[in-house]
Amino acid sequence: MTARDAAVRIKGVSHQFGAAGDTQYVRALADTSLDIARGELLCLIGPSGCGKSTLLNVIGGLMTPSSGSVEVAAKPVRGPMPHDIAFVFQEHALFPWNTVIENVRLGMLFQGVPKSEHAARAKKSLEAVGLTEFANHYPSQLSGGMRQRAALARALSLETDILLMDEPFAALDEQTRMILGEDLSVLLARTEKTIVFVTHSLGEAVFLADRVAVFSARPGTIKKIMRVDEPHPRRPDFVTSEKFTALRNELYALLHDEIRKTVSESARSED
Amino acid sequence: MSAAEQFLLRHPGVVRLGVIVAILIVWEIAARWFIDPLFIAPPSRVIASLGAVWQTNGVPAALRLTLFELAVAFAIAVAIGLTVGLAVGLQPFARRSLAPIILLLYGLPQITILPLFILYFGIGAASKIAFGVTHGMFPIMLAIIAGVQNLKPVLLTSARSMGASRWHILRYVIFPHMIPSFFAGMRLGMTGVLLGVLLAELYVSTAGIGHFTTMFTENFDPTKLFGLIAMLAAMAIVLNEIVRRAEIHFSRWR
């Protein structure tokens, strides 16, 4: 992949929390390099604490890595880049005192979108996630799935090329996740955004991703990259195909040892 | 359950009114037939005396003065409470180092240093305002410190990721987040200001409601005393209600 094709270039990124010798010292991420292509959906998957969320925050400029660097759109990342990157967080990242549409407008205000464009863009992004009727509801009046749709609408209205999603469906029930996953795939096929998606769910990773980056146990680094050759939008029956099952099993095999390592390590540190 | 019980369960206001009326009736009976009229006046006569109280030379001016002292003290208490509360609450280090001091000062029975206030600020309105301020500002500070503290970090992170400036974060994230605790603090602060101002007035004054309370008590005129207290209570209820209405208006999202 040449520099021009890459939406995001991650170059030798390592990160540790605290200083060596501290009780709080944790090596979260070790020497990770990866190019993310324009328009692809990359899933990061790995055991708890493997640094996949850390990597996402580093890409988004919310965290400065201990060493290494990230380039987005051929510019080095030194802080949040609201014109290039939008985030969708786990849950509760909507402002509870604002209605859905106010939340969307506030994102645009922060990013610096001219006021005259707010109404049209808000309408468009709420339509894209199917929340038009709930524009004037407060987050507390919505279900978990609808809240995440609203968060997605807020991110879409920013019209960035890159979307970073940090376990956006983790707090939702299985069925809601499935529907949101399908809708995201449809949306992705339409918008051609570059998406980095952190998840714990094997099925979600296979269903959504063009490539799945599998992380090793802490200190995390990319152990293997698995390709999923299946065009977007993915059809619901992809889940029941043999291809899906085979890929899911492959992913499970890759992850299983790492998860074991993490579990036995945390058991040891509890002694 | 009978129909009457069901009706009452659905209308707590009716029960509330009933309790108030019952208390007034007991009070009326006790004051008319059982207790020395030097000590207590029946509510009917208190209400009838309101006009006379109002016409007592100096009472309207005293009410105006007390209301003025309350308003000024409250405004100052809110300004100080908000500023200090934000400054201390938003900085984890400042919060850990300074919040215990504020807690300690709030716990101090300030009445013991009231004479100092008179000494520093004189026997006029200034000492009442100052005493009202010191009673009102601490609960406001503490409410704001506590309110700012439980702001979810993800809201700040997400605002930052969308390019929010410091001002944006203050205006659109921190302020709306602390509105409920700010109002809770304001209501506590209002009670504190009322207490501080009236204590100072009772202690020493030449004007204001406190002055007349002392006068009516010393003249064994409980009817007028109760009338004045009723006016004062009405004032306190109105002030509290204003804050409460504003609170409801700003907390629609909850």
Image: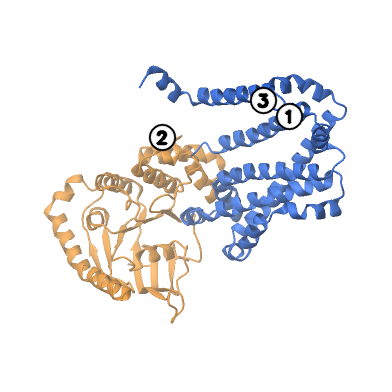
Give the class, few, some or many, for how many residues have Cα within 10 Å of label 1's Cα (few <14, many ≥20). many
Name the foreground residue: B101 vs B96: B101
Chain that the image shows in blue: B
Q: CA distance from mark 3 to mark 1?
A: 18 Å
The image position of residue B125, as x and y in percent, is 84, 43
Whole-angstrom CA distance, mark 3 to mark 2, is: 64 Å
| Chain bearing mark 2 | A
Query: Which of labels 3 and 2 is toward the front?
Result: 3
SS at badge 3: helix
Q: Nearer the viewer, mark 1 or mark 2?
A: 1
| Residue placed under numbered mark 2 in the picture | A134
- List x then y, in percent, for residue A242: 11, 54
Q: Residue at x 44, y 24 (%)?
A: B10
- In the visual, does B204 lie left or right of B144? right
* Mark identifier at residue A227: none
* Mark seen at residue B226: 1
Shown in orange, the chain is A
Q: Amino acid at mark 1?
A: Phe
Q: Which residue type does callout 2 highlight?
A: Phe
Say what amino acid the circle numbered 3 marks: Phe
Residue in the image at 23% along x and 48% along y:
A234
